[in-house]
Image (cartoon, rainbow, N blue to C red):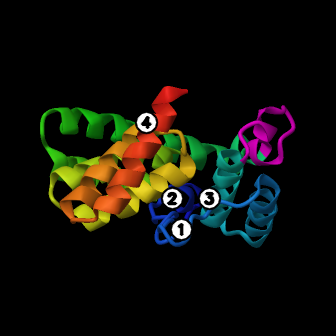
């Protein structure tokens, strides 16, 4: 197998890492160190995942020109893989929004699942969007799981709390729905 085909074959690098019980987000340095270890051992998939999570964990630290994660993500080894996966993931997220607008939520779920598997950075908005589609499709428990991950990544995202409150309400969990509605009000009041 050539290096090119190895770099661009698809395996879900994000599979099973983000659940409401385990949000795979630690310090930027921890992820960068793990990325460097994975790169040294030749595991490009794990290296890419760790460096991207390093960027998500501390976007301020990654703005520095010599930030460890960015050096690798833009470098000759991971750069092509990073660009391909990020571009594809973001494209899937954008297409899923159009599918949602047309009421095609099952199609949106499929595209968002692919985006999450391809690219952790695309996963940040994808969990919230997929949670919305799950709620519309009546898959309330899955919606709550995805929306819980979305608010873990973006705790000031009022829309995710609102969607989750509706999913809780549909399951009869009025107390959780009330807490999420209160959270929406406090976010919007700022």
Query: Is 137 located above or below residue 183 in the figure?
Result: below
Q: Mark 1 or 3, which is nearer the eye?
A: 3
Q: CA distance from mark 4 to mark 1?
A: 55 Å
Residue carrying label 4: 185
Residue carrying label 1: 1
Q: Earlier in the sequence, mark 4 or mark 2?
A: 2
The residue at the point 76 percent across, 48 percent down is 69
Q: Looking at this rendering, what residue extends furthest in the right direction?
A: 66
Image quadrant in which you'd find residue 160? top left
Q: Earlier in the sequence, mark 4 or mark 3?
A: 3
| Residue 49, numbered circle | 3
C-beta proximity under 8 Å, tags 4 and 2: no
Query: Is 43 located above or below residue 95 in the figure?
Result: below
- Please state the horizontal and vertical placement of residue 120, each as a whole percent of the image: 53, 52
Q: Callout 2: 10 Å neighbours few (<14), some, many (20+)?
A: few
The residue at the point 47 percent across, 68 percent down is 19
Q: Earlier in the sequence, mark 4 or mark 1?
A: 1
Helix, strand or loop at disc 4?
A: helix
Q: CA distance from mark 3 to mark 2?
A: 19 Å
Q: Would residue 32 appear left or right of 146 to someone viewing this image?
A: right
Q: CA distance from mark 1 to mark 3?
A: 22 Å
Q: Is residue 65 magenta?
A: yes
Q: Mark 4 or 3, which is nearer the eye?
A: 4
Image quadrant in which you'd find residue 27? bottom right
Compare residues 107 and 88 and report the one nearer the observer: 107
- Please state the horizontal and vertical placement of residue 154, each as a whole percent of the image: 54, 44
- Please state the horizontal and vertical placement of residue 10, each as a whole percent of the image: 44, 61
Q: Is residue 26 magenta?
A: no
């Amino acid at each position: 197998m050539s290096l090119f085909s190895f770099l661009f074959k698809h395996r879900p690098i994000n599979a099973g890492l983000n659940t409401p019980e385990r949000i795979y987000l630690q310090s930027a340095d921890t992820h960068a160190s793990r990325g460097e270890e994975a790169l040294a051992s030749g595991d490009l998939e794990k290296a890419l995942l760790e460096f991207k999570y390093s960027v998500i964990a501390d976007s301020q630290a990654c703005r520095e020109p010599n930030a460890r994660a960015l050096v690798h993500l833009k470098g000759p080894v991971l750069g092509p893989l990073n660009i391909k996966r990020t571009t594809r993931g973001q494209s899937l997220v954008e297409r899923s929004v159009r599918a949602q607008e047309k009421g095609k939520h099952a199609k949106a779920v499929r595209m968002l699942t692919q985006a999450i598997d391809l690219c952790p950075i695309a996963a940040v908005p994808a969990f919230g969007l997929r949670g919305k589609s799950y709620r519309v499709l009546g898959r309330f428990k899955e919606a709550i799981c995805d929306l819980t991950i979305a608010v873990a990544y973006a705790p000031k995202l009022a829309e995710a709390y609102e969607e989750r409150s509706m999913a809780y309400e549909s399951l009869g969990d009025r107390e959780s729905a009330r807490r999420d509605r209160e959270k929406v009000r406090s976010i919007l009041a700022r």
